[in-house]
Each structure stands twice: as structure tokens, then as C-alpha cells.
Image: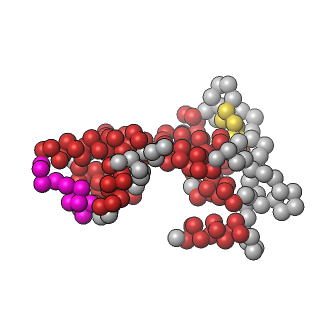
Amino acid sequence: MKPGKKSCSIFKAHFEKLQKANSRFSIRSLSRKAGVSHSFLVNILNGKSLLPLARLDDLCDNLKINSEDRDQLRHLIMLEKAKIDVEKLGDKKPQSNKVTELLPENHLVILEEWRNLALLELLSCYPESGLNLAEILARLDFTPTELEASLILLKNFELIKETSGQRFHKSKETLKIPTRGPNPSTRIFTKRRSS
């Protein structure tokens, strides 16, 4: 499966449009201007790599992509990244370890985004009624895309549930977060965060 099929096709269409207008415009010149490697840019254009959000503005400026298409690209990239994260983790659900009660290593992805923790914390404040999308967006400084990406990930791990009226509740699953000690999960998480 190609990681960013839709976002890459939009990006490629803009690249080809600019290349037709200016025959001297090439992948190498774009990679130099945007500060990415030639091979990485080729992978993006072929749909093998996602566009990096950190470099999106530089790439869009060099391709003269308007703000509407830029926002659409940002939205698609965030959704595609969330789907890829869920696919990488597979269908592994949290397993409770009654002796140590530590968060399984592959669930540390949830902790890497502050939005996931903020959403879990907010939903725990409304255990009976839950919140709908508009109420969550009013209380948290999220874009709809960021909220959708967090919801996909948290629903996959059954940490939140959605009821019939599109209201979201925190499920009875709890996260036990390792913070100290000689735990391999803690060491891996610390290495990821520091790099």
C-alpha cells in the first residue's frame, strides 16, 4: 500500500503543472530550494513517502500552491499518517499485565502526541454524557483534522467509544504509564522523545 496516495497525487499534479510551464524546473532544483534530498522528493512524487509536514510550507511555496490546496494537503497528510500509524500497530489491543500494569511497548505511540492525552483527559471529565465533535472542538485547541486523527487512533485501541448519537466517551480501559525504572518500554519511549 502506498502511504500517501491522495496527498502525493495532488502534490505531483502541482509539480507537473509547474514543470510544463517552466522546462528548467526539475526535481533536483525543487529539492535544493526546499531543503530535502532528491531521492526523498522522488519517493514523495511516486507516492512511496508521505509529504513531511515540517517541510510542507517550503515545498508549497516553491510549487506556488495556493492556501486552499495547501490546507487540503495538510488535512490529507494528517489523516494518512494516522491511518498508517494504526496499520503499523495492527490489531494489537492493550493487554493488561496484572503484575506490573505497564503500558505495552507498541502503545507508546499514543503518548507521542499530546493531543491524544488531552482528548482522553477531556473525555474522562464527562463520563456519563460524553461529548460530540463540536463540543470537543470548542473545549480543545484542535483542528478538525487533528481531532479526527486522534479519534482514529484512540478508537483503534478501544480507549474511547462512540455511541449512537456520535458522542464520544472514555472507555473503561485505562493507561498505566511507565515513568521510571528499568523498563524497556520506558527506555524506548525516552529515546524516541529525545531524538
Q: Does the magenta stretch include residue 27?
A: yes
**Whole-percent x and y of residue 75?**
42, 42
**Whole-percent x and y of residue 136?**
58, 39
Q: Residue at x 12, y 44 (%)?
A: 21
Task: Please indicate, yes or no, whether residue 140 appears anywhere in the rendered image.
Answer: no
The answer to which of 29 and 186 lies nearer the viewer is: 29
The answer to which of 15 and 190 lies nearer the viewer is: 15
In the image, farthest residue toward the right: 99
Q: Which residue is drawn at 67% across and 55% down?
A: 107
Q: Is residue 30 magenta?
A: yes
Indicate the quadrant where residue 158 lies: top right
Indicate the quadrant where residue 53 lies: bottom left
* Number of numbered discs overlaid on the protein picture: 0
Task: Please indicate, yes or no, whether residue 172 appears anywhere in the rendered image.
Answer: yes
Indicate the quadrant where residue 178 lies: bottom right
Q: Residue at x 35, y 59 (%)?
A: 40
**Whole-percent x and y of residue 24?**
12, 54
Specify whether 11 is left or right of 84: left
The magenta stretch spans which residues? 22-33
